[in-house]
Image (cartoon, coloured by chain):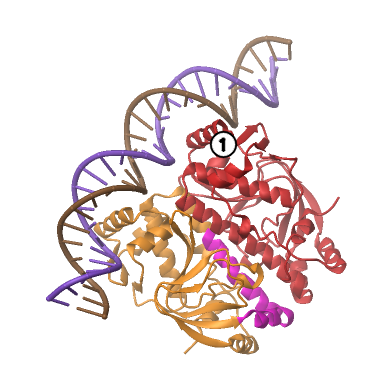
Chain colours: A orange, B red, C purple, D brown
Amino acid sequence: MPNPFVLKLEQCDSLSDDEKRVLESAISRVRVVENDEDIVHEGEHPSESNLLLDGFAARYKIFSNGRRQITAIHVAGDFVDLHSFLLKTMDHGVVALTPCRIAIVPHAALEKITDEYPHLTRLLWLNTLIDGAIHREWLTTMGRLSATAHTAHFICELFMRLKAVGRTDGDTIQLPLTQAELGDTLGLSTVHVNRVLQELRKEGLIRWQGDALTILDWERLVSVGEFTPTYLNLQREHR
Amino acid sequence: MPNPFVLKLEQCDSLSDDEKRVLESAISRVRVVENDEDIVHEGEHPSESNLLLDGFAARYKIFSNGRRQITAIHVAGDFVDLHSFLLKTMDHGVVALTPCRIAIVPHAALEKITDEYPHLTRLLWLNTLIDGAIHREWLTTMGRLSATAHTAHFICELFMRLKAVGRTDGDTIQLPLTQAELGDTLGLSTVHVNRVLQELRKEGLIRWQGDALTILDWERLVSVGEFTPTYLNLQREHR
DNA sequence: CGGAAACTTGAATTACTTCAAGACATGTGG
DNA sequence: CCACATGTCTTGAAGTAATTCAAGTTTCCG
């Protein structure tokens, strides 16, 4: 089974066999985290990072009053907390939205990579930069688009990201979020998410039954969401 | 005059004299950018990055309909587009909000650093990770706080960041933003920003005249904005 | 089959936007 | 130094997008 993280890096630049081997050997073990369980807790000082091999996860922050905001949705191939290698203290939690298969990479192994493999280091760095680019895109869509456009944009993004790691099935992706979780992601109330989804369905843009979300009209969905994929950096360059 | 970037890095970890020297020599030249001028344009493929020595700048995206969202406010010591070293294509513009003095660092110099100075590389990486942490915080405050709380939070953050690079004057900071620009930052309309500011003033939390913003009641401002500075990573650790 | 979780609907409310106009600055050319 | 233009701030009133509350329906799962 190909490592989806390698697959993802290879979208951006080429990797030598040596680099692939180093990455594989940086994994100390693989674990499974159950649905709804935290992969990392806010406030922790982890000594290892988590690479998502299978499943969906979310970064989130919770306010005193219980309101939650999801700041990232992670899919196979995402290094959900690579940043904890240098940030030291987790300023947010990461929760499994489905059962997740996770490769554990000790920070000691990452430090060794940064000491000895400059190009691989740049690719790891790049990975966190793409996370940042996605955050910026979410900021703009949250701040300046309507709830409907924002939702359409999110669906476009997730589709492209899943496609990049070979996790699409034609025009269909797995989207194992509840409407409440989607609300926490988009900064909307559950009720309003429900109405927005009805609109997108009525307009014939998507079908969403159970976990399966199907794009019925990509062009119009892109146009409604004002989606441009530049920020995902899915282009091979020398980095 | 001390380089504010070195000052900023030293909040997070200690730097050797050798590393400081390497950083200084990575600067190819210093330039000045006028108020309202772009420091970097969206869509560009820059071959150098811009380190802000003095002034205020903002990252922004613009939609087809002209609506703008600012995704970051930069102050002295911020590496406004360090990420372009690896992301290659700018997915947003960076504009000078005041006249800016800027140190230019060629990507070739950055590549050399990543090849030869692992610890310094990690600190540069860290710098972009803190940008990401700020983006996440903005996502949560934008998604889940009222306009008033969001605004208070922003002011708290900016105050702490300016303090970290020695750019505060007691309880006063320079805040050279128009209310329209503040709206683009917070995702609010100009009119509503004006009303929110009146509320913060009426409550005796801030004074803001011209460019000078004074914190009148830090404790209550922090409480209104639900501000916790963990995400700014202003703590010295071995990285 | 029963219970919990998720989804859906309607009605009332609220936070924020939009539009429009006026007040206050600030700077420029005559 | 004044007249005028331009940009920024302020205010009011009307409109709208999204929230909240509350109840009902459907789906999922043990």
Q: Is residue D19 toward the left or the right of residue A85 in the image?
A: left
**In x, y percent, where is residue B235?**
70, 61
Main secondary-structure element of the magenta-colored stretch? helix
Q: Is residue A29 above or below residue B76?
A: below
Amino acid type at image mark 1? Gln
Q: Is mark 1 on a helix, strand or loop?
A: helix
**In x, y percent, where is residue B160?**
67, 50
**B142 or B85: which is nearer to us?**
B142
- Seen at 48% across and 63% down, the residue is A60
Quadrant assignment, res B152:
top right
The chain identifier of the residue carrying mark 1 reads: B
**A87 or B122: which is nearer to us?**
A87
Task: Name the residue tied to disc 1.
Answer: B179
* Residue stretch rendered in magenta on the structure: A106-135
Q: Is residue A238 visible?
A: no
- Check residue A111 for magenta coloring: yes
Q: Is residue A217 above or below residue A212?
A: above
Q: Is residue A101 visible?
A: yes
Q: Is residue A147 toward the left or the right of residue B223 in the image?
A: left
Q: In this view, does A32 lie above or below B156?
A: below
